[in-house]
Amino acid sequence: MSKLSLTLACGDYEIVRALVDGRVAPDGIDLNVLTDMDSTTRHWRFLRNQEFDAAEISGSSYLIARDQEHPIEAIPVFLHRRFRHGFIFINTTKGIRTPGDLAGRRIGLKEFQATAVVWIRGILQHEYGVPLSSIEWLCELDETIEFVPRADFKIKRVPPDASIEQMLADGEIDAVLHPDLIRPLLEKDPRVGRLFPDYRNEELAYYKKTGIFPIMHVLGIKRQVIEKNPWAPINLFHAFDQAKSLAMKRLANPRVVPLAFYREAWEEQERIMGPDPWEYGLTDKNRHNLQTLAGYAYEQGQIRRKFAVDELFLDMSQGRKRGVEFRI
């Protein structure tokens, strides 16, 4: 019997390794997994051109795509999460000591709608009282999906040959919010530092207060695939969940990762965040997480209305108590 052939683009993560090497296969699906591209390229190619049947994509760009009625849906598989307090970078000569010092500044961004940046702006506004409309935002990339920004937001694009990382080091801008660790920081340039030197404790305090381990990416699927094969999304969901379970069992072994205090970090994560902070599905924690992100995207002018979480994700239910136990 022939299987449905689908091409999936996603990151090269341990939690998808079993799908890549074939140890886990979605029932009835022959999956061609592409992992050799960076996130921003993958997001652009799927959301702009729909080059893949399914793809790991930016959560905020997905919200914009749905707001603009693009023909895609999503399942609640979250392959990338990250705390973001440690990704606010400052020029050390500008007198920036606290979040409040960012008001009225010139701040560089990779792109305005990057999920990491949406989270950081929302956290700065809601947790530290930073007025976002007072800031001049300078973006390096074209937006993954174009949108009409809020009238009171000052958003500019830097020249194509400009680098916001170099502009920060040179003092042309005051700060950078970025999804990744920037080169001047990695190169230990003394002109560049973090807003929160002790960012880990800031992130722990944020988690203890809010219960949020920020979701960055969701799993998008072309609507035409779903319309032709309505059974496929839930089979994909269960395969992703199984692959993650295998990965977590393997990674519990401290011999797998060459870090001296790896097991201690694993046990600390479990003590603070529970047995599976990477859980999939629309659990209470994930609903709160996603509703917060959608609220930030709305406040920051990227979507025109507030979405309910159930509008954004396909239903993965098989009926009460079904799919839990297989008997013969």
Image (cartoon, helix red, strand yellow):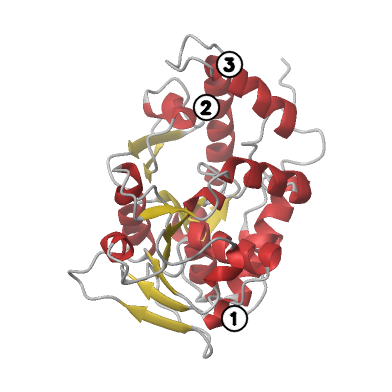
Q: Residues under labels 2 and 3: Cα distance?
A: 21 Å
The N terminus lies in which quarter of the figure?
top left
Q: Up-down: is 227 above or below 323?
A: below
199 with respect to 23 (left or right): right
- Which class describes the residues within 10 Å of circle 3: few (<14), some (14-19), or many (20+)? some
Element type where label 1 sits in the image: loop
Q: Residues under labels 1 and 2: Cα distance?
A: 36 Å
- Which residue is rendered at x = 52% and y = 43% of the image? 232
Q: Earlier in the sequence, mark 1 or mark 3?
A: 3
> Which residue matches tag 2?
243
17 with respect to 159 (left or right): right
What residue occupies the far bottom of the structure in this picture? 151
**248, 74: nearer the viewer:** 248
What x and y, as percent, mark residue 20?
38, 29
**29, 300: nearer the viewer:** 300
> Does the rendering let one see residue 282?
no
> Which residue matches tag 3?
263
Residue type at tag 2:
Ala
> Which residue matches tag 1?
304
**88, 11: nearer the viewer:** 88
- Which residue is rendered at x = 54% and y = 32% of the image? 239
Foreground tag (1 vs 3): 3
Q: Up-down: is 132 above or below 221?
A: below
Q: Earlier in the sequence, mark 2 or mark 3?
A: 2
Element type where label 3 sits in the image: helix
> Does the rendering let one see residue 38?
yes
